[in-house]
Amino acid sequence: MSKLRVAASVAAAQLRHDRARTLLAVVGIAVAVLSTTLLASLGYGVFQTGQQKFDASGRDLWVTGGSLSEGPGGFGTSITDSHITAGDIESREEVQSAVPMAFRAVYVGNGSGEMQTLVGVGVPGGGGAVDISEGEGFQTYDVHYAGGDYDGNMTYSVIIDTRTAEMFDVGVGDTLNIGGSVSTAKNHEFTVVGISSTFSSFLGAPTTTMHLSELQRVTGTTGTDKATFITVDLKDSADVDAVERQLQQEYPDYTIRTNDEQMRAVLQNNAVVIAVGGALVVLAVIAGFALTLNVLSIVVFQQKEELAALTALGVSSKTLVAMVAGQGVLLGAVGGLLGVVVTPPFVVGLNFVAAEIVGFEGLVQAPGSVLALGAGIALVIGTLAAAVAGWRTLRTVGIDQLAR
């Protein structure tokens, strides 16, 4: 214990002696910790954001058309005869509601002649499916789809998000041209009846939301009655797993998933992105260790004369390595603390950038577990790097003494 106390005292004295080198080492470790915590926060935030969005949907089951790699938004290929299929599912005793929805690329313009490609969302009607922040929203259900035919009146009503409103400088009561092609858009003028971030926050993109049949009309999919998926809300007494199995047997050509299963399937569809994120975390740790090792190697090597003198006085190599490792512990603790402290401000900044670029808020999240991971990595990196640097320097000192 006395040797350890001596080693710790000498380590602290050496760090105080050259504060410039100490500061450089602390900053190097802090950068390694910060890069690791930010990348881990991004991975955690992506998963949590996906979970929150699916939970917020309030749906128990998702009916998709099959392979995730072939469909829009990670939901599979389109479902045909969606109105009929949704009606058949909703007629089941355990089902509260079954809602077909569609995502389509649409051209949008404000009469100036310039068109932008946005995400068009089709829903049967208003109700609780769309949260309105301005305006009244849809006042009717999907009247254009009347009794199985597309011969009802079109409401020509559209709900947009704030990004679309800013893009075209429009608000409630203004009009937008929307269609599946530029020519179609010029012939269909919709009136903005509400502002909502419901789907833009889910998709992370500007959206225009209209009745499903009207979206199908302007995108030319009325003949097949295409929808991207059908969301199913069950009654409180229903067994979700049992209904899932029954629906899967009844609709073998479609894929039936629970909320959690659908989210995992979407994440698996983006496995390459997740793998890249994981690789970046590993590389950040490796780069942080290499940076810290180089910095501490310089710090320790510049103490070569002092270490040689202590060796000549009979101080054992274990004690000297412990002294150098003690410097690593101190540097790791301070650098780790600094990296953890600056992580939240960087998270706020990255969230602002992410919200501006991709439309998602709170995409980067740094829970206590991530910060603890960063602090632990700092201590491990500092201690191991210092020990390795000390061992390498002591070998050099020993060789020099033998040469003399």
Image: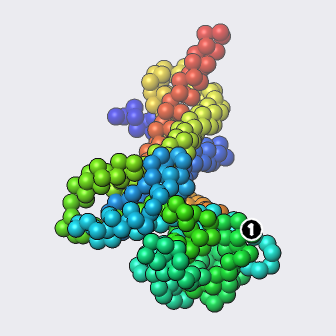
Which quadrant does the C terminus fall into? Answer: top right
* Residue 339 position within the rendered picture, expressed as x and y whole percent measured from the top left: 54, 53
Judge left or right: residue 166 versus residue 244. Answer: right
Residue positioned most to the top: 403
Judge left or right: residue 185 versus residue 247. Answer: right
Pick the residue in front: 135 or 267. 135
* Residue 315 position within the rendered picture, expressed as x and y whole percent measured from the top left: 47, 23
Please give the name of the residue rendered at 40% of the width and 32% of the height, measured from the top-left corner.
3
Residue positioned most to the right: 113
Pick the residue in front: 108 or 267. 108
Q: Is residue 197 visible?
A: no
Q: Is residue 143 above or below residue 308?
A: below
Please give the name of the residue rendered at 41% of the width and 79% of the height, measured from the top-left corner.
128
Please give the name of the residue rendered at 33% of the width and 56% of the height, measured from the top-left corner.
258
* Residue 213 position within the rendered picture, expressed as x and y whole percent measured from the top left: 52, 72
Pick the residue in front: 252 or 263. 252
Which quadrant does the N terminus fall into? Answer: top left
Name the amino acid type tagged 1: Val
Q: How many marks?
A: 1
> What colouring style does the render use?
rainbow
Q: Is residue 300 above or below residue 365?
A: above
Residue 345 figure quarter: bottom right
* Residue 386 position within the rendered picture, expressed as x and y whole percent measured from the top left: 53, 33
Please give the name of the residue rendered at 61% of the width and 65% of the height, measured from the top-left corner.
220
Q: Is residue 241 above or below residue 311?
A: below
Q: Is residue 316 above or below residue 180?
A: above
Identify the residue position indicated by label 1 in the image: 182
Q: Residues within 10 Å of mark 1 (few under 14, many from 20)?
A: some
Q: Is residue 91 visible?
A: yes
Secondary structure at badge 1 equals helix
